[in-house]
Image: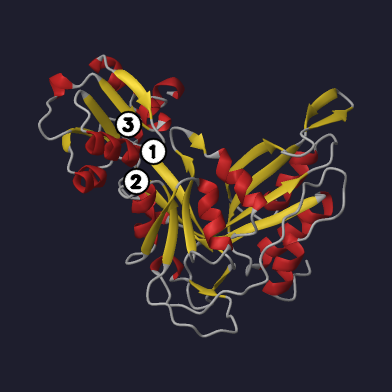
Amino acid sequence: ERSYRSLGGTMKAAMSSRSATRQPKQFHSSNKRSRSRRATPIESATEARPGPESIREETLSVAYQGVPGAYSQEAATTAYPGCNAVACDNFESAFQMVQSWTADRAVLPIENSLGGSIHANFDLLLKYRLHIVGEVYLPINHCLMCLPEQEMKDVEKVLSHPQALAQCEGYLQKLGVVKEEFIDTAGAAKNIKENMLNGAAAIASASAAELYGMKVLEAGIQDHKTNVTRFIALARDPSMQKSSVKKPYKTSICFSLNEAPGVLFKALSVFALRDIDLTKIESRPMRTNPVIESRSGRQFNFLFYVDFVGSLTEEPCQNALRHLQEISPYLRVLGSYPMDTSLNVNVWNEDADPLNDLVR
């Protein structure tokens, strides 16, 4: 097969889309180029696209959703040690900070091993022309905490993010307490401390307890101990793989398909034919034109999100995207970036997974 002549040609071709009635609204990125900066660990296997300016930045500014002590802050500092982590009220604010050059990067959750995908961030990836330049898998260890003078017997209600409450559902039922939703985990601990709420406890991280002077009543209270969240790092420009580094890469794409029998099989076959491993596939109804008429009646009009192992510098991946573009009216590369392989080390205990009882 004929490969693309250059990586630049690959990115240009893969990100373009043909005009079609099902094609979603396009958003345009800023014309500004990224400034030169000091390399960070998450990009140790990459090199940023050079810009015309040579402004030295001593500290990378990284946006995250939540307040100090949140799991997202921990993910940001894990991805970029020594960075200036900047708290944002919501996910979209983090996207906007990077796009407007207020922050250099954003680190946001994209999926959780128990709660599934964070769909709001999938939608924002399409709305903003930012690029995924890295990923971090963060084990989540929930702690029950209260004011220093309180004890377990004093706890009547528990505050936390809805997902954290759901992940500790069995534990909270045994306690017999009232559950109260809060905007984020660390924010719940901060609220209890600032308002001196007796009889209230929060579910948050150990770092949040230390930061806000809370007493940890019990750690590791999640119902499933293998609780992991995957975070992605976003930048204005894509990363490019260094030829001297052989670290495995992952590429994330989004595409649509016309209505036809077997069309999804054909789309996925472009990867199978080239022995390219898929690590994720998910469908989402389009935000614009979500329902279409088909031969079998009305149904959802889907976008497909796929992650696969490989980088845009590899010929099989280039040819797979070119092949996919032939049958897809819309195709966009969301990013090609170094894989975080730490999930394979002491994180998943197969014997601790209750789902194994259903398949043995």
The answer to whether one can see residue 204 in this image is no
Q: Is residue 318 above or below residue 6?
A: above
Q: CA distance from mark 1 to mark 2?
A: 8 Å
Which secondary structure lies at badge 1? loop
Whether the residues at callouts 1 and 3 have beta carbons within 8 Å, the answer is: no
Q: Residue at x 42, y 54 (%)?
A: 136
Give, as a three-letter code, the residue at label 2: Ala
Q: Residue at x 71, y 42 (%)?
A: 303
Nearer-N-terminus badge (1/2): 2
Give, as a three-letter code, the residue at label 3: Asp
Kindly identify which numbered label has been placed on residue 70.
2
Q: CA distance from mark 2 to mark 3?
A: 29 Å
Which secondary structure lies at badge 3? helix
Colour option used: secondary structure
Q: Which residue is mark 3?
A: 351
Which secondary structure lies at badge 2? loop
> Badge 2, how many Cα within 10 Å: few under 14, some, many 20+?
many
Whether the residues at callouts 1 and 2 have beta carbons within 8 Å, the answer is: yes
